Structures are given as structure tokens and as C-alpha cells.
Image (cartoon, rainbow, N blue to C red):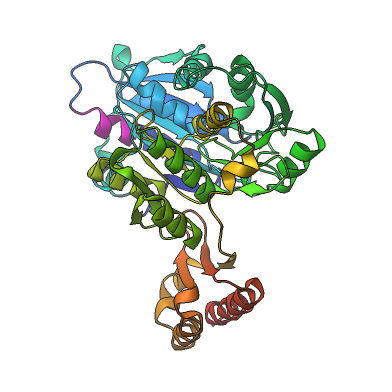
């Protein structure tokens, strides 16, 4: 992880940490690095979610991009995967998304996409970082007629929606669907997409006011969608995060269908229809043990990576696979998209419901999840990584690993986007793993307080 870019772009508390000056300099540096081989005036797209800070950071990015001679094409409020898709459709040199994804409103972030629609490799991000942090004085500004222009792309939402519509066969007439937009980017596109495909839709949390994004709603707070799905007698519920690159679901009984179960559903269906390349699905070390059991029983091969959709994508590209994702709901369909896409994931699930004619609960029953508990421990920057060699923490972790044996596992890692250590334990008995997790958390908290 770099000094500016984490596992999913640059991120921090908007304005005070991720400042306007930083955003402007990222715009300048990204424009110069990503378009240095362009023989024409560079063209860079900018999208954003619904955070109140988005307008301010958008203005700073526009200023940075145009000040070095590139044109800024403003998409408005769109999902992150829309930027990745439109950068190719509009033949742009790069794309920028202003979003902190599932994080609370006070955070914001800047994600960069190359002209191919893929997120940037580490080497390119490092080059941009060096310009912003070490050599800002080497950035050459334009003047006169060489200054970039600002263009507003009024059809961006519909261009994205129409593309998603074309990825499925048929329509969704007969399906009643509950949709939680997290008061985020999908609030602008979901109604166009799902009603346009014929579904009978019930929308919740689709009234963003700039401050309510992800606030007790969306894919990180599933209670609302589960209740609304049952109350409205829907066939299935869908929940997106703030920038709609994630999707989780619930069945008609209000039971959560997480990313692991979605991958199991997609793997089985795509294998049966001959669409799962190499019969392989790419997952991360956080994937539930139940998925690996499902895969073995159903003849699905599994490739495992470290946490982060960028690492899933790298493995998919290296191995020639077309399906991968994370428990959090980042699902990548590489035949149709270059990044995780919540609304694409949703329409793929609805397509399977329509074609198989079975209930969502029956689809999700293909996989039985092991009990899993995830706890977060706040940690300051000076203590990051230190817990890995602290004797008491190490001994505590090893003791519980020995107790679990082959009936579970412990995974502890630092978040790539927040100042947190994440403690995850799986096992057969929820009460037992809860006790183990609490004791490990206590040991890490004791270290953090030293």
C-alpha cells in the first residue's frame, strides 16, 4: 500500500484529510501520468456518489485536470462501475470516481481508472503519488488556449443503464423486487434499470440528501432490506453500497444472501450453462469455509487471493477466469465488466431467478455457511503492524488456532481503507468463536493502548 493510495484509491475524511489541494494535485498528476503517450488532447471522465463533499472535490479535480491541459468530462452522480464502463465507451484516456464506497458520509475518496476501464496497477499509482507528494513543483501548468475544457455528459446514466440491460436475456416481468439504494449512487440509476427491465419494484433509501449515504442502510446494514422484502412480499431483496460496486441480497423470507452465497449461485449456474471459464471461481482468504465445501461437492475449482477486489481481478486476468468476488458483495463478471458492479450482479441474480423458476431461498440453499464472526479494533497509525509481533497477541492467536484445529480458522488483517484491525473467526459453534474473537480483540486493544 502506498502513502496516498490504499487498496481502493485515496481515501480519508473529506476536506480535512483528503483536502481540496490534494484532490487538485491528484487530478494534475493523474492527467499527466495517464496521458503522457497521448498524441491528442487528453480526455478524463469524472463521476461521483451522493456525498455532500463530492461537489467540492469534483471542482478541485476539474481544476487540476484542466490546469495541465486535459479536458474534464463530468458524468455527475453515477456508480463506480459506470465510470469504468464509460471510459471505454467515450474513448477517454482515464476515469476518476469520487467516492468512499461503503464508508460514512464524512469520508470521501478518489479512485482512478485507466483508459482500458481497469483500476490502475501499483506502479502507475506510485508514479502519481511521487508527483503529488514528492515532486509537485515538476508539474507543468498550461495557459491560454492550451487549458482544458469542461464538458458535461448528460447521457452518462442512461448509457450505463442501457449497457447493463444488454447483458441479460429476457425481462423481469413477474418478479417483485425490493431494492435498497443506500441513499447513494444507485439512487440515480436503479429505477431506470430495474423498472426498465419490467420488474415490480419497491425502493427504500433512495432519497439522498448529501448526508445520509450508507446511514443505517445499504449492503452494510441489511436489517432494513430484509424487513422490507418480507413486509412487501417480494421475491428477493437487493442492497447496494454507496457507490454501487457491491451488492448483497436477501431471500423472500428475509435471510441474507452474502457475497459468498452469490458466488456459489453464480458458479453453479454458469457451470451448468457452460459459461464458467475453466470451471473456476476466484475468491479471497475471507471467503466462508462453506463455499469451499460447496465447490468441492459441485466440481467447481477455486483460486484464492488476498483481500481486495483488485487482487481478485488480477488472478482472474492471470488465470483466464470470468467469475470472482468477495463476501462483501464485490462480484466481478469479467466477460461484461472490468470491476465489481453491484447492479450487474443484481440483474444476473434476477435472471437466474427468472430462468430457473425457483425461490431465492432455494437458490441460496446450494451453500451452507459456517458461523463466522468479524470484529474491528481501532488502531493508530504508529501501532499499525506492531500487533503482529506482540508476544501476548501472538500467543493468544496461536492458542485459539490450536483449539479450533481443522474445524475452523482465524484470519486477522489490517483494513486497507480504515484505521482498523479486522478479526475474523469461523467455526462450528458460534458461542465458542465469539468468545475466542473477544479475547483476541482484548489482546490487540491492550497492545494498542500501550
> Residue 48 in the image: x percent, y percent?
52, 30
> Residue 138 in the image: x percent, y percent?
24, 38
339 sits to left or right of 360: left
113 sits to left or right of 440: left
Residue 423 versus residue 228 in the image, above or below:
below
341 or 300: which is nearer to us?
300
112 or 59: which is nearer to us?
112
The tally of labels here is 0
Tell me if residue 29 is in the magenta stretch.
yes
Report the magenta stretch's main SS.
Answer: helix
> Which part of the image, by quadrant, shows the N terminus?
bottom left
Is residue 357 something that shows in the picture?
A: yes
Is residue 64 something that shows in the picture?
A: no
Q: Which residues are magenta?
A: 28-36
218 or 304: which is nearer to us?
304
Name of the residue lying farthest toward the right: 231
| x 53%, y 63%: residue | 420
59 sits to left or right of 43: right
Question: Residue 70 appears in which quarter of the rendering?
Answer: top left
> Residue 228 in the image: x percent, y percent?
77, 38
| x 55%, y 31%: residue | 356
| x 36%, y 23%: residue | 87
Tell me if residue 257 is in the magenta stretch.
no
Residue 58 versus residue 401 in the image, above or below:
above
> Residue 262 in the image: x percent, y percent?
52, 44
> Which part of the image, by quadrant, shows the C terminus?
bottom right
4 or 235: which is nearer to us?
235
Amino acid at each position: 500500500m502506498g502513502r496516498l493510495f490504499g487498496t481502493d484509491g485515496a481515501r480519508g475524511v473529506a476536506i480535512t484529510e483528503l483536502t481540496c489541494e490534494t484532490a487538485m494535485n491528484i487530478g494534475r498528476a493523474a492527467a499527466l501520468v495517464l496521458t503522457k503517450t497521448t498524441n491528442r488532447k487528453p480526455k478524463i471522465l469524472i463521476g461521483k456518489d451522493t456525498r455532500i463533499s463530492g461537489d467540492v472535490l469534483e471542482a478541485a479535480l476539474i481544476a487540476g485536470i484542466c490546469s495541465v491541459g486535459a479536458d474534464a468530462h463530468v458524468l455527475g452522480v453515477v456508480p463506480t462501475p459506470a465510470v469504468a464502463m464509460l471510459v471505454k465507451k467515450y474513448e477517454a484516456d482515464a476515469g476518476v470516481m469520487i467516492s468512499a464506497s461503503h464508508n460514512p458520509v464524512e469520508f470521501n475518496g478518489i479512485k482512478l481508472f485507466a483508459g482500458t476501464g481497469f483500476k490502475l496497477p501499483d506502479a502507475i499509482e506510485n508514479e502519481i503519488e511521487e508527483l503529488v507528494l514528492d515532486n509537485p513543483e515538476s508539474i507543468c501548468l498550461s495557459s491560454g488556449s492550451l487549458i482544458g475544457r469542461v464538458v458535461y455528459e448528460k447521457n452518462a446514466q442512461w448509457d450505463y443503464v442501457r449497457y447493463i440491460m444488454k447483458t441479460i436475456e429476457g425481462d423481469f416481468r413477474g418478479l417483485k423486487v425490493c431494492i435498497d439504494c443506500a441513499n447513494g449512487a444507485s439512487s440515480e440509476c436503479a429505477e431506470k434499470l430495474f423498472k426498465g427491465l419490467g420488474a415490480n419494484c419497491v425502493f427504500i433509501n433512495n432519497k439522498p440528501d448529501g448526508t445520509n449515504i450508507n446511514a443505517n442502510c445499504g449492503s452494510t446494514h441489511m436489517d432494513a432490506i430484509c424487513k422490507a422484502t418480507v413486509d412487501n412480499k417480494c421475491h428477493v431483496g437487493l442492497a447496494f453500497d454507496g457507490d454501487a460496486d457491491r451488492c448483497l441480497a436477501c431471500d423472500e423470507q428475509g435471510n441474507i444472501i452474502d457475497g459468498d452465497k452469490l458466488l456459489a449461485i453464480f458458479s453453479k449456474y454458469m457451470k451448468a450453462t457452460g459459461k464458467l471459464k475453466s470451471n473456476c471461481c476466484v475468491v479471497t482468504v475471507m471467503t466462508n469455509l462453506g463455499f469451499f465445501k460447496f465447490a468441492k461437492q459441485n466440481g467447481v475449482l477455486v483460486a484464492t487471493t488476498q483481500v481486495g477486489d483488485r487482487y481478485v481481478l488480477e488472478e482472474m486476468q492471470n488465470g483466464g477466469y470470468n467469475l470472482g468476488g468477495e463476501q462483501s458483495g464485490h462480484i466481478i463478471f469479467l466477460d461484461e465488466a472490468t470491476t465489481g458492479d453491484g447492479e450487474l450482479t443484481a440483474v444476473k441474480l434476477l435472471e437466474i431467478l427468472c430462468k430457473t423458476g425457483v425461490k431465492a431461498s432455494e437458490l441460496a440453499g446450494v451453500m451452507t455457511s459456517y458461523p463466522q464472526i468479524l470484529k474491528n479494533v481501532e488502531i493508530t497509525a504508529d501501532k499499525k503492524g506492531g500487533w503482529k509481533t506482540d508476544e501476548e497477541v501472538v500467543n493468544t492467536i496461536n492458542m485459539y488456532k490450536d483449539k479450533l484445529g481443522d474445524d475452523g480458522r482465524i484470519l486477522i488483517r489490517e483494513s486497507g481503507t480504515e484505521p482498523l484491525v479486522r478479526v475474523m473467526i469461523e467455526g462450528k459453534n458460534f458461542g465458542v468463536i465469539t468468545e475466542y474473537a473477544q479475547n483476541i480483540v482484548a489482546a490487540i486493544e491492550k497492545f494498542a493502548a500501550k
